[in-house]
Image: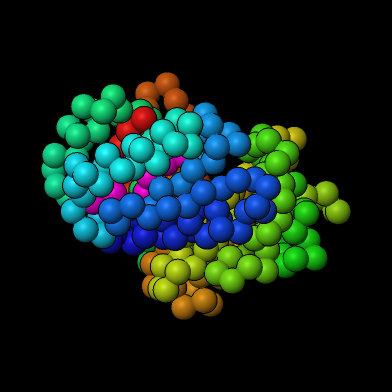
Amino acid sequence: MHPAELGELEAFRDFARAAPDELGFVVEEIDGAVCLGLPTIPGSELFNRVLGLGLDRPATEDGLERIAGFYERLGTAWQVALAPQAEPLEIASWLERRGLSPGYAWMKFSRRVGDPPDASTELGVEQVGPGRADAFAEAISRGYGVPALFHDCLRALPGRDGWHCFVASDGDEPAAGGALYVTGTIGWLGMAGTVPEHRRRGAQGAILAARLQAAAAAGCEVVVTETGELREGKPSSSYRNIVRAGFEPEYVRPNYR
């Protein structure tokens, strides 16, 4: 499996496992694909989606039927992240016959570890453990504008095996956050958000550089991440930050919804 897919897949699988039971996350592996389900938020495409379809082994129509049944039983919307390496080539037509169509695609990036970019900010940036888990959760929750029920899910990550969580602070106030998840020699960057009133202060550039340094210290050989593909009239500061940090675009991945 391509590192850009494996890093994301393992990070989201563990994120779901870390969630409190009352959140209701369901994770099931079907035909080699990881199916995430969150019936408490049935309309969320990010948390009701399929990762790795056709990558660990070729997908089958029977397997896709079982995946569709999984989401039907949960009563949620669902989305399939369809990597260009997925086999067989007929998967896209199978999805379309079931009423799924390509939505907003993601650009996948990677870079070698080493030579982190120079990044400066007046904010204080630090890696945090359980003692500052609330600060990390607050920064991400407010940055993304996610429902309050995700707070306990996010606060479970600092100190959890595989996760390296960072917070940029203005004094005692959390201004931004970001996470690194390490699986084998792959580092995945995600869960990055900045509180609206602290944007354009260099927080994410500094947190990104800190995560690259942490990835090198953890023994990673490659670091991967993703963001929405560039579209005319749809500017993306996230895309610019990633490229500025030395990441190379790998491929565009459609998301069937």
Q: Residue at x 58, y 34 (%)?
A: 41
Q: Where is residue 88 in the image (x, y as percent from the top left)?
A: 14, 47
Q: Which of 204 and 43 is in front in this view?
A: 43
Say above or below: 93 vs 201.
above
Q: Is residue 127 left or right of residue 28?
A: right
The colour scheme used here is: rainbow
| The N terminus lies in quadrant | bottom left
Q: Which of 95 and 255 is in front in this view?
A: 95
Which residue, as the protein is rendered here, is positioned at the far right? 172
| The C terminus lies in quadrant | top left
Residue 194 visible in rendering: no
Q: Residue at x 13, y 39 (%)?
A: 90
Q: In this view, does 25 lie to the left or right of 234?
A: right
Q: Residue at x 38, y 45 (%)?
A: 50
Q: Tell me if residue 41 is in the magenta stretch.
A: no
Q: Where is residue 170 in the image (x, y as percent from the top left)?
A: 80, 50
Q: How many marks?
A: 0
Q: Where is residue 104 in the image (x, y as percent from the top left)?
A: 38, 30
Q: Please report the bounds of the magenta region as a residue range.
A: 48-54
Residue 184 visible in rendering: yes
Q: Where is residue 77 in the image (x, y as percent from the top left)?
A: 45, 30
Say above or below: 149 vs 87.
above
Q: Residue at x 46, y 65 (%)?
A: 187
Which residue, as the protein is rendered here, is positioned at the far top? 233
Q: Is residue 94 left or right of residue 153?
A: left
Say above or below: 72 vs 84.
above
Q: Tell me if residue 51 is in the magenta stretch.
A: yes
Q: Classify residue 159 by image quadrant.
A: bottom right
